[in-house]
Image: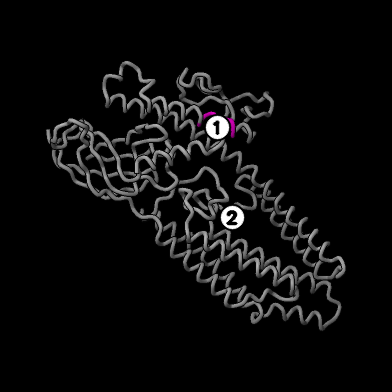
């Protein structure tokens, strides 16, 4: 398990790009030889941890605070420097002579050094996330108008031979109105992700339920605008009456039912997740930035069945409804009840998955850590103890900066869990095992052990006996 954890940490650290050559606050002089920007004190620059260099060219290594390329490069260099430092410590190199003689002192010193370096990486990662999010509004607006252009091309191609109709004009006009509304939303929320701001959750990830609901809301709004455009262009009373009757509930009952259910699911899931987090039955760690993969994965980046099936079934139903609207632009898409019920079952499965995911971290046992050749003995102050359980590392908290936030309460003393580097990752802490020393400040006797995770969740209290 520790090996898998280590590999996961390595993948998460190396899988992110980054940018700029600024200097970190608290960086030790000479800590990262040969790496630009790691010489020691922070040069005064704009907020976000990026250095000066405002006059440098906007190239891959620029340090301007508003340059996303600089943010990416700074993060990449920070990650590379951190990984080199971690591998040096894992190989037993880089230890000062003052602590090399003591295993506990060496471990504590290495842990503190890695925690400081990890915080520097996290600062760069947050700067990259802010720069990426600020540019997302322009990208979303470009995608929206590209979709309008594709619709125009499709209308023009299909009109060859059949001729241009009022329905095609109404469809293009509706697309322009929807695209204009989304572009305006992107401008007003340009610092929070543009048009995607409403579907980004409180944990800074794309919300599957909100995205599906937003897609159906936009589609239904587009369908109604198409009918409105056709109604405005109708010249005969019979044609106008037919278009108005196309909005009857009997014809669009399936689509309206699906819209109501997906919107209700989006609201209910937010409530469920919020209550479970407050009740410490679910651990949530804020992401650095939203990703498209969030729609199909959990917080740790693993694909989840509930999310995948909900997105797939909803996408298939949406495509079917779009085809029906293209074939019958004089009424709301009459989504067949079989497909509507299938989507309702998928939504119920997704909601059940939200209720079932997560769980409170738990301590199962606490034992004295024993090295090879060590004698069996009770737990004494200064000894290392192994805390065995589950849920110590929340999904999405595999980064070193978040692992360093873990705390174990030993009686009244708060002990930070040391980071123990191994080749490719960390051997401590892991999701099922923590190793911490019993501090000398505790009094012998019965003590309660409790773990506080990076998400702030607390485990149950476990009582152990500490002797002199």
Mark 2 or 1 closer to N-term? 1
Is residue 441 visible from the viewing direction of this image? no
Pick whichever, 405 or 346, lies toward us. Answer: 346
Quarter occupied by the C terminus: top left
Q: Position of residue 12 (x, y in %)?
A: 48, 40
Q: Residues within 10 Å of mark 1 (few under 14, many from 20)?
A: many
Identify the main secondary structure in magenta.
helix
Q: Quadrant of residue 47?
A: top right
Q: Is residue 331 magenta?
A: no
Task: Describe residue 383's horizontal placement relative to residue 16 as left or right.
Answer: left
**Nearer to me, 283 or 42:** 283
SS state under label 1: helix
Q: Which residue is mark 1?
A: 76
Residue drawn 56% across and 48% down?
Answer: 291
Residue 8 location (% of width, % of height): 43, 41
What are the residue bounds of the magenta stretch?
72-79
């Amino acid at each position: 398990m520790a090996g898998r954890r280590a590999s996961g940490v390595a993948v998460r650290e190396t899988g992110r790009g980054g940018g700029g050559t600024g200097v970190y606050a608290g960086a030790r002089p000479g800590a990262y030889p040969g790496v630009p920007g790691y010489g020691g004190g922070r040069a005064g620059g704009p907020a976000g941890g990026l250095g000066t260099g405002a006059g440098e060219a906007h190239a891959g290594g620029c340090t301007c605070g508003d340059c996303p390329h600089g943010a990416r490069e700074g993060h990449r260099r920070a990650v590379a420097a951190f990984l080199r430092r971690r591998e040096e410590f894992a190989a037993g190199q880089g230890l000062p002579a003052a602590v090399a003689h003591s295993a506990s002192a060496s471990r504590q010193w290495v842990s503190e050094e890695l925690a400081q370096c990890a915080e520097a990486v996290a600062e760069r990662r947050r700067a990259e996330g802010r720069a990426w999010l600020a540019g997302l509004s322009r990208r979303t607006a470009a995608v929206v108008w590209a979709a309008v252009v594709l619709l125009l091309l499709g209308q023009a191609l299909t009109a060859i031979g059949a001729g241009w109709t009022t329905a095609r004009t109404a469809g293009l006009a509706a697309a322009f109105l929807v695209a204009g509304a989304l572009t305006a939303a992107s401008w007003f929320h340009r610092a929070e992700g543009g048009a995607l701001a409403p579907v980004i959750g409180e944990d800074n990830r794309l919300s599957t339920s909100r995205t599906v609901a937003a897609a159906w809301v936009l589609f239904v709004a587009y369908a109604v605008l198409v009918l409105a455009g056709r109604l405005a262009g109708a010249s005969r009373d019979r044609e106008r009456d037919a278009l108005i009757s196309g909005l009857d509930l009997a014809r669009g009952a399936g689509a309206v039912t699906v819209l109501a259910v997906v919107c209700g699911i989006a609201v209910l899931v937010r409530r469920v997740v919020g209550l479970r987090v407050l009740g410490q039955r679910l651990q949530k760690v804020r992401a650095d930035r939203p990703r498209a993969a969030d729609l199909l994965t959990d917080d740790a980046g693993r694909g989840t069945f509930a999310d995948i099936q909900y997105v797939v079934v909803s996408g298939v139903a949406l495509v079917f409804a779009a085809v029906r609207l293209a074939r019958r632009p004089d009424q709301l898409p009459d989504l067949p009840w079989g497909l509507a019920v299938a989507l309702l079952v998928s939504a119920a499965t997704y909601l059940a998955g939200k209720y079932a995911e997560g769980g409170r971290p738990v301590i199962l046992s606490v034992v004295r850590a024993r090295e090879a050749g060590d004698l069996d003995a009770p737990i004494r102050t200064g000894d290392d103890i192994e805390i065995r359980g589950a849920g110590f590392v929340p999904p999405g908290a595999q980064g070193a900066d978040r692992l360093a936030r873990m705390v174990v309460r030993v009686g009244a003393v708060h002990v930070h869990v040391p980071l123990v580097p191994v080749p490719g990752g960390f051997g401590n802490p892991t999701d099922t095992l923590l190793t911490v020393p019993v501090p000398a400040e505790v009094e012998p006797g019965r003590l309660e052990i409790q773990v506080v995770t990076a998400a702030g969740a607390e485990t149950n209290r476990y009582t152990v006996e500490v002797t002199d």
